[in-house]
Image (cartoon, grey):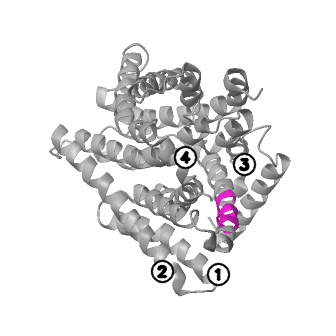
Amino acid sequence: MDLQHMVSLLFIGYIVYTIDKKQENFPAPTVLLIVGMGLSLFSYFDAIILTETMLYHLFIPPLLFVSAYQFPIQALIKNKRIIFLLATLGLFIHVLLLGALTYTLSLFWFPISFLGAMLISAILTPTDPVSVVSIIKNSTVDNDLAHVVEGESMFNDGTSIVVFTALLQFLAPTTESSIGGFLYNFLIVSIGGLLIGIILGYLMTRAIHFSKHSHYQLMLSITLAYGSFILAEGLGVSGVLAVVASGTMLSHAFYQSKKEAHFRDLLDGFWEIVEVSLLALLYLLIGIEVTDYLSIRYLGIGFTLVIFAIIARYITIFLVSRLVKRHNWRYNLLISWSGLKGSMSVFLILTLHLRTETQATTDQLVAISFTVVILSLILQSLTLSRLTRKLVGKP
């Protein structure tokens, strides 16, 4: 993507965001996705290609960083049990349930192996609430619902990659894999990423005082966002969880001290601009890229899997909410409906598309997965506002 295309896409994103400034009428990322699909019809955008490397290394670190930094630390502490259980135990339950439902469906509709069904399930497990969090907050007076949805998404992005990678290893005939080895790797990769993020986040909060110039301090925050990701990935642990942990550490340090009020305001303003700019580019790029993989013959399968994903997610949330003694069927349904698929699922699909050596990467798997992601983004985000207002809406 050259500078000319990037400026064009940013301007289109500006128009979409300006139409609905408060994000009350429609979810802008979903509209950007649809607009991007329309742009793919014009030859001017043929040269634009969204690769898994671009998505994972350029877009995901800063978007996760700003989500973690802006996430209220008090909300994380208050909802820590349900958030971490959903991102760990809940993730495993969801993958198994959706994988089983997908495989059962395949017996009657389309040929696919059990491990292939589990791969699709792992691809569809990460959630991307950026399209709906503002809608939830505008539709209800209780922000706990939005906090749980957003908090879970930040952490399950990292854990879902570990599960997906393990399934790829199981599919590779030359790779020796075991359940015990998978669990050990899951713990090492996850805990290692969190530790790196915590350490670098702490060091950054100390280093920020060496410079009194606010612009230089902003430069340091950019270094932290990408540096924690790069270091963790280089050490073989989760770069995603490292970014989340470093952003959370920064939030904790600067939101408990009034001395940093000026720096917080500057940091907020800078990263908010970065966030909307990257989201505009990302969802337009996804829309442009995804049209090459879509086929009308998979619409029925895709729609059915969207329903299966919601059912599997509701069962998962029901079980987890029982464990933490916070059962509320209305909230459980809304959290389930808010589990949209997004950028992380697209990254996993693009990664799967390259792993032809597993003999499980087929055009069918990729096309089905992309179809589910697009239908999930469109159908769930456009109906969430009405559903939220009906179940737990503002009086």
Tell me which numbered mark, 4 or 1, is placed earlier along the sequence. Answer: 4
**Crowd tier of the residue under label 1, counting other residues whose Cα lies within 10 Å: few below 14, some 14–19, many 20 or above:** few
The secondary structure type at the circle numbered 2 is helix
Q: Secondary structure at mark 4?
A: helix
Q: Residue 215 got which mark?
A: 1
Total labels: the figure holds 4
- Residue 245 located left or right of residue 392: left
Secondary structure character of the magenta stretch overall: helix
> Label 2 vs label 3: CA separation?
44 Å
Quadrant including the C terminus: top right
Sequence-wise first label, 2 or 3: 3
Judge by depth and name the residue closer to the eye, 43 or 179. 179
For marks 2 and 3, give the one nearer the viewer: 2
Q: Residue 392 at what x, y percent from top left?
A: 68, 25
What residue range appears in magenta? 268-276
Find residue 150 and report its image quarter.
top right
The Cα–Cα distance between marks 3 and 1, rounded to whole angstroms, is 37 Å
In depth, the one of 7 and 151 nearer the eye is 151
Numbered label attached to residue 75 = 4
Pointer 3 residue: 39
The residue identified by callout 2 is 207
CB under 8 Å between callouts 4 and 2? Answer: no
Q: Is residue 286 magenta?
A: no
Write the residue at 37% across / 31% down.
Answer: 95
Query: The residue under label 1 is which amino acid type?
Result: His
